[in-house]
Amino acid sequence: MAAIAQRIKAETALPTAVGRFIEEPQQAEEIIANEQEDLVMLARKELDEPHFPYHAAKALGVAEPQNVLPLPYPYWLKRK
């Protein structure tokens, strides 16, 4: 899907998004870093793993990964 959205972006200059088959944080980061897409949607992945943003932030080396979550969640995660 990323290749199709990338082609649409190149030919129309419209913002594009991709969401299918994104399983690893590095995949999403690479798509954005290489400017292949403007947005990576993670709804399906987050349904499978509700704490995916936290785990992704940790995997990508974010200094305080708990800060990518809504305020009640970091408190809970720090206590774990």
Image (tube, helix red, strand yellow):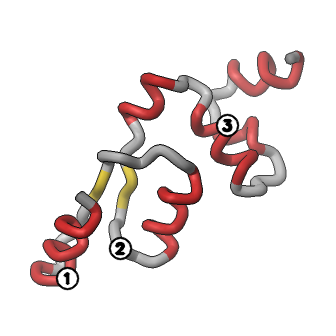
Closest to the observer, 26 or 67: 26
Amino acid type, mark 3:
Tyr
First-in-chain label (2 vs 3)? 2
Tell me if 9 is positioned left or right of 32 in this view: left
In this rendering, the answer to whether 79 lies above or below 70 is: above
Tell me if 67 is positioned left or right of 33 in this view: right
Rendered image: mark on residue 54: 3
Percent x, y of residue 32: 46, 67
Which residue matches tag 2?
A: 36
In this rendering, the answer to whether 42 lies above or below 50 is: below
- Compute the Cα span from label 2 to label 3: 23 Å
First-in-chain label (1 vs 3)? 1
Closest to the observer, 78 or 19: 19
CA neighbours of label 1 inside 10 A, class few (<14), some (14 to 19), many (20+): some
Q: Please count the marks in the image.
A: 3
Rendered image: mark on residue 40: none
Asked if marks 2 and 3 touch (Cβ < 8 Å), the reply is no
First-in-chain label (2 vs 1)? 1
Which residue matches tag 1?
A: 10
Asked if marks 2 and 1 touch (Cβ < 8 Å), the reply is no
